[in-house]
Image: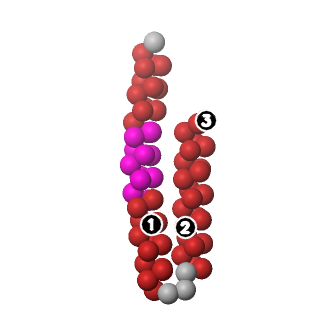
């Protein structure tokens, strides 16, 4: 399903940021990466909620047909 592929891609991006965080040398670099991970997670949460609401709506419409 397209939604699952999208969520998988977001999860993969999160892993990439975690690897970058481990490779960062200075505390400042690590802080920048941590902030980017937090931003990405916030986006993932909001998009997941939006996608789940849309999926629920589609399922309800299918059941109503």
Q: Quadrant of residue 39?
A: bottom left
Nearer the observer: mark 1 or 3; the answer is 1
Return the disc, 1 or 3, that comes first in the chain's sequence. Answer: 3
Nearer the observer: mark 3 or 2; the answer is 2
Residue at the image point whose x is 42% and y is 24% from the top? 60
Q: Nearest the camera: 60 or 6? A: 6
Q: Residue 49 in magenta?
A: yes
Position above or below: 15 against 48: below
**Residue 41 placed where, x, y %?**
44, 59
Return the disc, 3 or 2, that comes first in the chain's sequence. Answer: 3
Q: Which residues are magenta?
A: 41-52
Give the labeled residue for mark 1.
Answer: 36
The image's colour scheme reads: secondary structure
**Cα–Cα span, label 3 and label 2:** 25 Å
Marks 1 and 3: CB-CB under 8 Å?
no
Return the disc, 1 or 2, that comes first in the chain's sequence. Answer: 2
Give the labeled residue for mark 2.
Answer: 17
Q: Which image quarter is the N terminus in?
A: top right
Residue at the image point whose x is 58% and y is 64% from the top? 15
Give the labeled residue for mark 3.
Answer: 1
**Cα–Cα span, label 1 and label 2:** 8 Å
**Residue 20 placed where, x, y %?**
57, 73
Residue at the image point whose x is 38% and y is 49% from the top? 46
Q: Residues within 10 Å of mark 2 (few under 14, many from 20)?
A: some
Q: Residue 26 in magenta?
A: no
Q: Residues within 10 Å of mark 1 (few under 14, many from 20)?
A: some
Q: Residue furthest top?
A: 65
Marks 1 and 2: CB-CB under 8 Å?
yes
Secondary structure that dominates the magenta span = helix
Question: Which type of secondary structure does the marked residue at label 3 adopt?
Answer: loop
């Amino acid at each position: 399903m397209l939604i699952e592929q999208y969520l998988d891609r977001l999860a993969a991006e999160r892993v990439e940021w975690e690897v970058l965080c481990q490779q960062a040398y200075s505390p400042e670099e690590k802080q920048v990466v941590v902030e980017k991970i937090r931003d990405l997670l916030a986006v993932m949460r909001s998009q997941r909620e939006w996608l789940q609401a849309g999926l629920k709506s589609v399922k309800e419409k299918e059941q109503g047909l």
